[in-house]
Image (cartoon, helix red, strand yellow):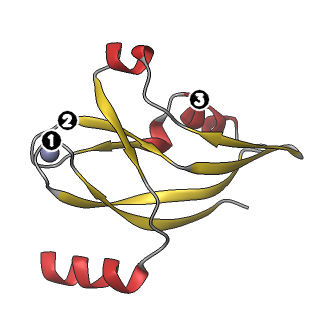
Amino acid sequence: MTQLCHCKVVCPNCGETGVRSKYNSVNTTRKPELKMRVAKWELYTWVCPKCGKKYILSYPSLINDNGIMWVFTAHFSEELATRGYSGEIVVDNECEDPFIEAFWNQKE
Ligand SMILES: [Zn+2]
């Protein structure tokens, strides 16, 4: 199954903080559209709501594609630069759901 939690991200450009889904494991079996989203980096992209810069979120994600498992970690590259990405944000914090709750309460 696909398991996700939430992580806090900080924009390296303007310092804005945000919350993004973090996919600890992704099961793409019988879900070709999900496979495409992995391939297109979509699951690992964060756009800063303040300055609009686009970053790739770098953390290990366990991909299970029809029983074939591997660990995928997105990294910033020249290719991503040509697609408008500004860099990568290394996500090393774990699910901080109490924090996330407080974050959303504060935003409301
Ligand atoms: Zn920003």
For marks 2 and 1, give the one nearer the viewer. 1
Q: Is mark 2 within 8 Å of ligand 1?
A: yes
Residue 52: % across, % down: 15, 38
> Reading the chain from its start, which is encountered first: label 3 or label 1?
1
Q: CA distance from mark 3 to mark 1?
A: 26 Å
Q: Residue at x 46, y 60 (%)?
A: 92
**1 to 11, vertically: above or below:** below
Residue 108 visible: no
Q: Is residue 94 left or right of residue 78?
A: right
Q: Is mark 1 within 8 Å of ligand 1?
A: yes
Does dot 3 land on a helix, a strand or a loop? helix
**46 to 24, vertically: above or below:** above
For marks 3 and 1, give the one nearer the viewer. 1
Quarter of the rendered image showing ligand 1: top left
Disc 2: CA contacts within 10 A as few (<14), some (14-19) or many (>=20): some
> Reading the chain from its start, which is encountered first: label 2 or label 3?
3
Does dot 2 land on a helix, a strand or a loop? loop
* The disc label shown at residue 27, or none: none
Residue at numbered disc 3: 39
Callout 3, which amino acid? Ala
Disc 1: CA contacts within 10 A as few (<14), some (14-19) or many (>=20): few
Residue at numbered disc 1: 13
Q: CB under 8 Å between callouts 2 and 1?
A: yes
Q: CB under 8 Å between callouts 3 and 1?
A: no
Callout 2, which amino acid? Lys
Residue at numbered disc 2: 53
Residue 104: % across, % down: 24, 77
